[in-house]
Image (cartoon, coloured by chain):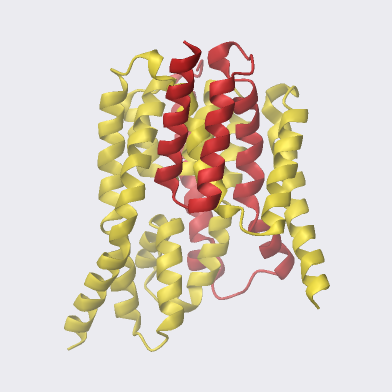
Amino acid sequence: MTQSAGEIWFIIAALGVGTFLIRFSFLGLIGNRSLPPWVLRHLRYTPVAVLPALIAPLVLWPAATGGQPDLPRILAAAVTLALGMLSKNVILSIAGGAATLYLGIYLAG
Amino acid sequence: MASSGTRSAYWLGLRHGAPFVLVIVPFALLFGVVGTEAGLNLAEVMGFTVLVIAGASQFAALQLMTENAPTVIVLATALAVNLRMAMYSASLVPHLGAAPLWKRALIAYLLVDQSYAVGHAYFEKHPEMPLSARMAYYFGVVSPVFPLWYAFTLVGGLVGQSIPPEFALDFALPITFLALIAPALRTVAHVAAAGVSVALGLALAGLPYNSGLLIAALGAMITGAQVELWMERRVK
């Protein structure tokens, strides 16, 4: 991280204000008007649209291994995803992924 | 009479919000740890947690900051993760929109996935509830969640400074995101959106300033919405 303290606080403040305005949008500013269906249809997919694109390069090309694909990390990601889809339990999935990662790193020595 | 009804609504909300403690505590700890590992000081970590209070977007911002992405990209991406909250805000208006402005501002500040999901479901089921009881219920739901979110981020931040690199905490963030996203892959449209997001995210990873991420997200959103339309038409 090379940002100055000023830049970091600018990001924190702008993200805080922006997120509040999103949350306050209808409750405080727009009121009882419904969003057009096509907008709702797109908003529904924002988390699954943004986060996978952010994670995928981190899984395949981790900075910790200098960008080389790393089997323990790929397996850990696969286990986390599978556990999450089957159990819908966030904590169980994180624990399973972490256990796989540590076991993999230990075995790969 | 009204006040005892309000009080019992508060306690009911508190009970309904209590299970989220199990999710919030580890998530908060993790943000504290990962944030300090990434190079933020304790005040900055707490600044995120108190001013933004939206875990997934905080982690997204943190990741892009460690990649030294430009501020505009950091903000656009993290805010995109939070856009869904506009939908939450809109669907709470029929239930809480008549509250005084400062209370609506407080409700908005405390609007997260958990408080929306529990609150909205309960208000829909109990339309006879008076406004004062609805607000009490909502504040009950968030009561166990927020103090623990702040407190355990602080604990994580304090602990994070003493965790050695052998623990491979670089991977805590991808694992957390995967665990958050996996349960959301519940329809064909969600899976299609995530698939396009991964494919474009990898293909465009080389673009300057992490700009590929936003293009991938936009493409994935459109994909999700289109697939949803197709599925609806097939059912009809």
**Quarter of the figure that contains the N terminus of chain B:** bottom left
**Quarter of the figure that contains the C terminus of chain B:** bottom right
Q: Residue at x 42, y 30 (%)?
A: A99
Q: Residue at x 53, y 55 (%)?
A: A22
From the viewer's perspective, tell me whether residue B190 is left or right of residue B13. Answer: right
Q: Residue at x 35, y 85 (%)?
A: B129
Residue B201, placed above or below residue B180: above
Position of residue A15 measured from the top left corner of the image (x, y, whole percent): 50, 41
Residue B68, placed above or below residue B22: above
The residue lying toward the viewer, choosing from A5 and B223, is: B223
Position of residue A4 measured from the top left corner of the image (x, y, whole percent): 47, 18
Asked which quadrant contains residue A81, the reply is top right
Q: Is residue B45 visible?
A: yes
Position of residue B8 measured from the top left corner of the image (x, y, whole percent): 21, 77
Position of residue B101 measured from the top left corner of the image (x, y, whole percent): 39, 68
Residue A93, placed above or below residue B201: below
The residue lying toward the viewer, choosing from B215 and B109, is: B215
> In the rendered picture, chain A carries what hue?
red
The residue lying toward the viewer, choosing from A87 and B195, is: A87
From the viewer's perspective, tell me whether residue A7 is left or right of residue B195. Answer: left
- Label count reads 0
Q: Residue at x 78, y 74 (%)?
A: B235
Q: Is residue B70 visible?
A: no
> In the rendered picture, chain B carries what hue?
yellow
From the viewer's perspective, tell me whether residue B157 is left or right of residue B232. Answer: left
